[in-house]
Amino acid sequence: MSGDMYAEKLAWFKEKERPEAVLLVADDPQLTKVVVAWTNTAVRRRETPSKLRGDSEGEVWKWLWENTEYSRQELVAKSALSEYGFDSKLVPLVGNRVLYPDGTVNSFIQRYLREKVLKLFDAKIKRASKKGS
């Protein structure tokens, strides 16, 4: 039952995600690095979740993260950021629901990053074709 509750509560947050979260990451390359690293870090939920102590959004969100396991060292290494101050990058991403405790990210953030990558490739292709002309 508690495994189902974890998935149910997480799905509820994903259904309520907001596009404004993109503004948090849009002009901060370090936050972007953490987001990308999060999607490449091994994440799992605890086999036996703790008891949910409240029904508020904040309490449920905190409960989901308390029942999530990942290697902070792996995340730091994959983000290529220094250990010093790393939490100042991670905390707002978690608090603003950019990162989800299942290893995924807000879908608006995901679309934004994909479009950004496509624009980079498009610019490189255009530059390469101009050089070849």
Image: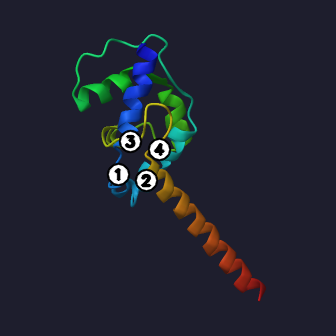
First in residue order: circle 3 vs circle 2:
3
Per the image, the residue denoted by label 2 is: 108
Q: Measuring 53% from the left and 63% from the top, which residue is drawn there?
A: 115
Element at label 4: helix
Image coloring type: rainbow
Per the image, the residue denoted by label 4 is: 34
CA neighbours of label 2 inside 10 A, class few (<14), some (14 to 19), many (20+) = some
**Res 123 quadrant in image:** bottom right
Check whether the beta carbons of the residues at disc 4 and disc 2 lie within 8 A of each other: no
CA gap between label 3 and label 2 equals: 12 Å
First in residue order: circle 4 vs circle 2:
4
Per the image, the residue denoted by label 1 is: 21
Image coordinates for residue 14, horizontal then vertical, percent: 40, 40
Residue 129 appears in the picture as rendered: yes
First in residue order: circle 2 vs circle 1:
1
CA gap between label 3 and label 4 equals: 23 Å
Q: Which label sits in the foreground, 2 or 1? A: 2
Q: Which label sits in the foreground, 4 or 2? A: 2
Q: Which label sits in the foreground, 1 or 4? A: 1
Image coordinates for residue 21, horizontal then vertical, percent: 35, 51
CA gap between label 2 and label 1 equals: 8 Å
Element at label 2: helix
Check whether the beta carbons of the residues at disc 2 and disc 1 lie within 8 A of each other: yes
Image coordinates for residue 44, horizontal then vertical, percent: 52, 24
**Res 29 quadrant in image:** bottom left
Give the number of the disc on residue 15. Answer: 3
First in residue order: circle 1 vs circle 3:
3
Q: Nearer the viewer, residue 64 or 31?
A: 64
